[in-house]
Image: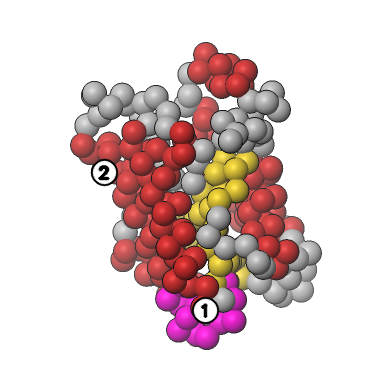
């Protein structure tokens, strides 16, 4: 119950980690705006959220995080409904479009950067601008990076670059926004069971699992636990950092 009366925004909330984060924030007492490029899946997430606390009210919204116009409309919609911007934002919207570097088409590289990196920038900027404009005393912005941004991965030059990028973005945002009481951190999952990893060939998953010291893939709820900690005041002295949630994969 660390997030009672807090308004939170989760992008990519229609699936996987974003859905688990939405559920966890709601169970901690927050009102959650579930935003996704698929409005149907955002609605489905909202339908599963706990909402029995006084004042708790959730909303589903369509957004394309790679479009400045779409992100702006989302923030306007939120402020029209709740009369305040979200003080917690979790950037979970993300895509993969894998191919080996030697074959990767420019369009695949651009699209992954647009959604994962530029999308995180646009949402972080819009939320921070709204929080600063209304004089909010505190905020917490959490961005899903990936362990792949640190160590690279076969077939993921675009994805690895985008995830390394969000760590640089987050550290810079943390430095610039700390004077407004806004903390910015990344969470770096390893291999988590979601629709995104459903696309990974079984033999690659078996190999990856054998490399994980804890011996299994992670559950989206285990990433959501860390996001809830970073959203809450329990992490009030933490900003500009990345927390790995990998079962020990590629430690050190
Ligand atoms: P997922 O595919 O289950 O969910 C991603 C969600 O983002 C989907 O609901 C999708 O509709 C939405 N989305 C895609 N493009 C969008 C856009 N332009 N605007 C708004 N929403 C958009 O994936 P997931 O596994 O839950 O991943 C969530 C985040 O965690 C991603 O940023 C991903 O890169 C990161 N991550 C996942 C893993 C993993 O193993 N699953 C590992 C490391 C990092």
Of residues 134 and 237, the one drawn nearer to the viewer in this rendering: 237
Looking at the image, the residue that sits furthest to the left is 106
* Quadrant holding the N terminus: bottom right
Q: Earlier in the sequence, mark 1 or mark 2?
A: 2
Distance, label 1 to label 2, CA atoms, is 32 Å
Q: Mark 1 falls on what kind of element?
A: helix
Q: Is residue 212 left or right of residue 104?
A: right
| Label 1 sits on residue | 180
Q: Is residue 65 above or below residue 31?
A: above
Crowdedness near tag 1: few (<14), some (14–19) or many (≥20) residues, C-alpha within 10 Å: some
Q: Please tell me whether mark 2 sits on a helix, a strand or a loop.
A: helix
Q: Is residue 67 left or right of residue 135?
A: left
Please name the residue shown 22% across and 32% down the image.
105
Can residue 165 be found in the magenta stretch? no
Circle on res. 110: 2
Instruction: Please report the bounds of the magenta region as a residue range.
Output: 127-139
Residue 10's label in the rendered image is none
């Amino acid at each position: 119950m660390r997030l009672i009366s807090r308004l939170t925004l989760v992008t990519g909330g229609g699936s996987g980690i974003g859905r688990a984060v939405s559920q966890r924030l709601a169970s901690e007492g927050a009102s959650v705006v579930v935003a996704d490029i698929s409005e149907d899946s955002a609605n489905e997430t909202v339908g599963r959220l706990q909402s029995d606390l006084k004042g708790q009210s959730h909303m589903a919204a369509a957004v394309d995080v790679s479009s400045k116009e779409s992100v702006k409309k989302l923030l306007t919609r939120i402020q029209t409904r709740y009369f305040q911007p979200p003080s917690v934002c979790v950037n979970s919207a993300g895509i993969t479009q894998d191919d080996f570097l030697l074959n990767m088409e420019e369009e695949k590289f651009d699209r992954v950067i647009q959604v994962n990196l530029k999308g995180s920038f646009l949402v972080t900027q819009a939320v921070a601008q709204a929080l600063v404009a209304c004089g909010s005393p505190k905020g917490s912005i959490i961005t899903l990076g990936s362990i792949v941004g640190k160590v690279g991965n076969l077939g993921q030059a675009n994805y690895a670059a985008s995830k390394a990028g969000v760590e640089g973005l987050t550290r810079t945002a943390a430095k610039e926004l700390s004077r407004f009481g806004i903390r910015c951190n990344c969470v770096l999952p390893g291999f988590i069971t979601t629709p995104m990893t459903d696309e990974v060939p079984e033999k690659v998953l078996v190999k990856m699992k054998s490399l994980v010291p804890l011996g299994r893939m992670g559950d989206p709820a285990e990433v959501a636990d860390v996001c809830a900690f970073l959203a809450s005041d329990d992490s009030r002295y933490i900003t500009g950092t990345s927390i790995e949630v990998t079962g020990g994969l590629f430690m050190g």
